[in-house]
Image: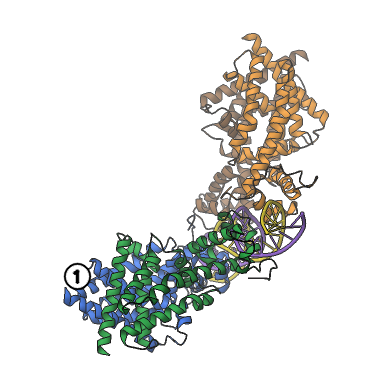
Chain colours: A brown, B orange, C blue, D green, E purple, F yellow
DNA sequence: AATGAATGAGCCTTCATTCAT
DNA sequence: GATGAATGAAGGCTCATTCAT
């Protein structure tokens, strides 16, 4: 945010001021910024490139969002909310057998992360954030990620017959998430270690099923034992 | 690398010239560079900061390593070799029951990656490389990673009763690697989602055992079926 | 020119915006650049020195002209046009006896090149260009020099009674141009070999007349023979 | 010369110290420096490139010649003496009819300046000096150029029937020199304005003959008149 | 509400030079 | 006598930001 700039203190509240499609420049900036931030991350992105892609003046970013970090904050929070609440949460909250829910959430995550050739925009943003966190990460974790982490623990705990905050429950959630994250995160490695692999939708379904099978094998065995 | 610079092609063979602390500037540069590259990645690191931390002139990097990329190449390859050849490979090549080898390699990976409380320096270097690969990545994959990937496939294939290049073998290797990588990769998330977690050696052993148990559950069940 | 920079594509059409002294920084940069480029040539000139002389920030060059080469291009083309199209071409195209035209163009060239006591700014720019051509030279030759070279050949051809592209016609044009160019080109030598020489306007007229006499002697003799 | 460096105060006097082919490194440096200085001029040449081409250490130039300018001075003076005294002077001093001497010196100059594809090494050095004089130029003019300039004036004066320091004599010398210098100095222009031109030895002879004819036409006519 | 112009700090690299051996 | 190591200054350029309108 740097020094407190007078005009850059807008919030979403102003977006209804002039009726409907007001402030198209601001919207275009957000859209352009999301794409470039997703591609290169916060630090490697320049406001010049954003302005150019949005067909806006170089000073527009500072005018509308105060500074680069202000723009990034808006982009990241919007996108994180979108994926956390609109995509993952409904799957986790559907009424179905826990095992089916688990399988469906794995499919959803894999498709959302690696679908259509490359990871979805919100996921790419988060992937960068994971690598080199900005001051915005904590906010985003609280708003968009912890709720789903808790839901996952509840789900896996139900399958295990253990409470959601039991250490084993957590470790199992991590085992599942780690398997899923491996594909988008290690893709530059996979491209070199297994060049034949093409992440078609069918292949992604096959991968998701494998992860589900792999995980359920333990969850079932552990439940029996306990 | 840019234009081939005359000097900067040292191999360290000369390190006995003056008795002990020969070529300290070069070594200090490598050390400082490793730390800063690990923290910020190649692109966000400046040679000024490296020089400053090594207490060297800014032109020293150019003199000893040609340019920034030359220095980075040396740092990354050294670290990758250290992990891949010195730490992991001996574990994978020891004569023991496959299941024991698997468990031991998981322990070794976890300890090497998170040993000192947070992601280890070589791993943090690779994490940045995964996010935004440099021209050095391919080299490092060939030298330090593919051999161990192949050994892992052989090991897991033996446990599954499947050939090393069977799709299921590969997916299982990825499932294991994904679980391991989750902890260093998602550490900024974990720090926020499970703040109580302290990665003590004991805890890391517990985690490694969990990953081994989690994985063996599937590998055994799959073998019986086939 | 490097990457296409958004700004820096001004054409000066806007110079009436504020009444008179609009865009003074850009104009001052051009002026300062012309002088320093003329003195030291493209390669030995630094943008820092230009900025300093223009009392502008060092980034101003980049903003207004993209990069050093963009600024140089504008300087060189402007000056070349000024000489080639505004000064020499009208003389070559006037309706008069060929011999008179020849004498007048020699006078015009000498005055334009050495008028102010030493080699003129546009000529000094071209002198450096001759020594170590930049990518701009070809452009300038095509725009500002070839047309006049062709007109000279037509003129001399008419005097010789030979076609414009006859070898002898060309060699005669070169003989005339060489005599003219000698004074600005070899001025560092002349200053030492003939220190008494002061290039006053009268002296320049005397020199120009000599060159015309010297040249016409051959042209006339050759015409009779052919 | 910069600051007075102790070891760099060698002169040619030392070259006989150790017998015959002593100090080969120094000689190699001189040779390499001559080539690179001739190609790029003093300012654009780097001591690194010289050291590299001479297969010498980067500090060798400073050791042997004090600094870059010391090396350049030695190179330039040696070469200027060579061309002035060994090539041009004998032609100008031969016993023959003045007109024949003039023609021969024109041929010699043209061949030496443009022969074998590009100008001879000493001429290329001088050409750079002409464009952007260094502090060495005055020395070189006195030692190697003024004597021949004086001989040329004597020669042309004899043809004109005028004293050597008559203004017309000087202007005629300049007219001749200008025609000759045109080809090496304006070659980047010629390459664009007359691309078919190839400076073969035959073509150079043709050009030299033209320059001689062109000049003699005036010299003879002027003599008759006076 | 919005922008073209301008800024200062910082980037990587290369320069001629000097130091310690 | 000669060299590898090291240095400080400067090179062109790009950055996010701010100013004046």
CA neighbours of label 1 inside 10 A, class few (<14), some (14 to 19), many (20+): some
The quarter in which the C terminus of chain B is drawn is: top right
Between residues C134 and B187, which one lies in front from this camera angle?
C134
Q: Secondary structure at mark 1?
A: loop
Question: Picture coordinates of residue C43 (x, y %)?
Answer: 51, 64
Looking at the image, residue A223 lies above or below residue A2: above
Looking at the image, residue A1 lies above or below residue A150: below
Numbered label tally = 1
Q: Chain of mark 1?
A: C
Question: Picture coordinates of residue C191 (x, y %)?
Answer: 47, 81
User: Toward which corner of the image does residue A119 lie, by quadrant?
Assistant: top right
Between residues C24 and E20, which one lies in front from this camera angle?
E20
Between residues C34 and E18, which one lies in front from this camera angle?
E18
Question: Picture coordinates of residue D129 (x, y %)?
Answer: 49, 71
Q: Which residue is mark 1?
A: C162
Q: Kindly tell me whether residue B110 is visible in this rendering.
A: yes
Question: Picture coordinates of residue C75 (x, y %)?
Answer: 45, 69
Q: Would residue F9 be found to the left or right of residue C25 on screen?
A: right
Looking at the image, residue B161 lies above or below residue C45: above
State the residue at coordinates (51%, 60%). D36
Q: Kindly tell me whether residue C14 is visible in this rendering.
A: no
Between residues D7 and C128, which one lies in front from this camera angle?
D7
């Amino acid at each position: 945010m740097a020094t407190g700039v007078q005009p850059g203190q807008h919030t979403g509240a102003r977006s209804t001021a002039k009726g409907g499609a007001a402030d198209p420049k601001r919207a275009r900036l957000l859209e352009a910024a999301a794409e470039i931030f997703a591609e290169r991350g916060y630090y490697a992105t320049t406001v010049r490139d954003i302005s150019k892609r949005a067909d806006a003046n170089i000073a527009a970013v500072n005018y509308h969002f105060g500074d680069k970090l202000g723009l990034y904050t808006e982009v990241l929070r919007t996108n994180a909310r979108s994926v956390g609440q609109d995509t993952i949460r409904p799957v986790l909250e559907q009424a179905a057998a826990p095992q089916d829910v688990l399988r469906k959430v794995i499919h959803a995550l894999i498709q959302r992360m690696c679908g259509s050739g490359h990871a979805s925009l919100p996921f790419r943003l988060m992937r960068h954030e994971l690598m080199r966190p900005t001051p915005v990460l904590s906010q985003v974790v609280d708003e968009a990620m912890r709720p789903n982490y808790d839901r996952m623990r509840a789900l896996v705990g139900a399958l295990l017959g253990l409470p959601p905050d039991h250490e084993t429950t957590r470790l199992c959630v991590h085992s599942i998430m780690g398997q899923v994250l491996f594909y988008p995160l290690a893709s530059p490695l996979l491209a070199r270690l297994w060049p034949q692999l093409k992440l078609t939708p069918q292949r992604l379904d096959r991968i998701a099923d494998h992860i589900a099978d792999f995980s359920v094998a333990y969850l079932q065995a552990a439940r029996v034992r306990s």
